[in-house]
Image (cartoon, rainbow, N blue to C red):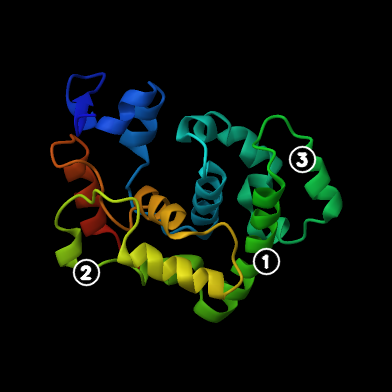
Amino acid sequence: MSNTIPGPDGKPRCGWCAAAPEFFPYHDKEWGFPVDNDQRLFEKICLESFQSGLSWRTILAKRENFRRAFDHFDFHKVAQYTDADIERLLKDAGIVRHRGKIEAVVNNAGKLLELIKNEGSFAAYVWRFEPSEKVLTAPQTASRSAASEAMSKDLRKRGWKFVGPTTVYAFMQAMGLINDHAEQCALRLSVENARKKFKRP
């Protein structure tokens, strides 16, 4: 697949947008723009873990269902989920009904509360893993990196689940820790400017 494809306005977009027309709004308005809100970050890492082994199109189509099912990823509430909640979620046809992934979200919500107690915020923790300027100068081509491996290893040490280096790399791309828009993509410069203006937590 080419690095870019023409978008609805004729300008180039990252080639992965070719997979589905609904990717364009997500690509143009969200993907790669920096995030510092703990609840949004938790949502993003949870959705990336659900995506493991599936297409992102499936997850994006179900995103509103996921938000409804998991109290909009309010990790304070999710951390209190019981076995009855897990059974409820396993019966919810609007989401991906994978017991391991559902249990991981509940587990990770609890681990996030511990992390915030120690680190101040999820955002402050995540942004510590931002790669050096040298690494960030060009779009990445791999599905994992030294930074994603380091974050994955640390999260798993803290008891998180379904946060392998590939999942963490996709999370880093989505929440703007790196700018992985293709060199010729019309949004690359916008994301880069947003990252320059962004105040690291």
Q: Quadrant of residue 30?
A: top left
**Amino acid of disc 2:** Ser
Judge by depth and name the residue closer to the eye, 173 or 163.
163
Q: Does the image show residue 201?
A: no
The mark closer to the camera, 1 or 3, is 3
Judge by depth and name the residue closer to the eye, 193 or 115.
115
Q: Is 9 drawn above or below residue 141 in the view shown? A: above
Mark 3 element type = helix
Mark 2 element type = loop
- In the image, is 77 to the left or to the right of 201? right
Label 1 environment density (alpha carbons within 10 Å; few <14, some 14–19, many ≥20): many
The mark closer to the camera, 3 or 2, is 3
Q: Which mark is residue 110?
A: 1
Disc 1 to disc 3, C-alpha distance = 20 Å
Question: What residue is shown at x 25% (from left), y 51% (from top)?
Answer: 179
Question: What residue is shown at x 32% (from left), y 48% (from top)?
Answer: 33
- In the image, is 21 to the left or to the right of 94? left
Counting residues from the N terminus, which is met first, the one under dot 3 or under dot 2? Answer: 3
Counting residues from the N terminus, which is met first, the one under dot 1 or under dot 3? Answer: 3
Q: Which mark is residue 90?
A: 3
Instruction: For the N terminus, give its image quadrant.
Output: top left
Q: Residue lying furthest right in this view? A: 84
Q: Does the image show residue 136?
A: yes
The residue beneath circle 2 is 132
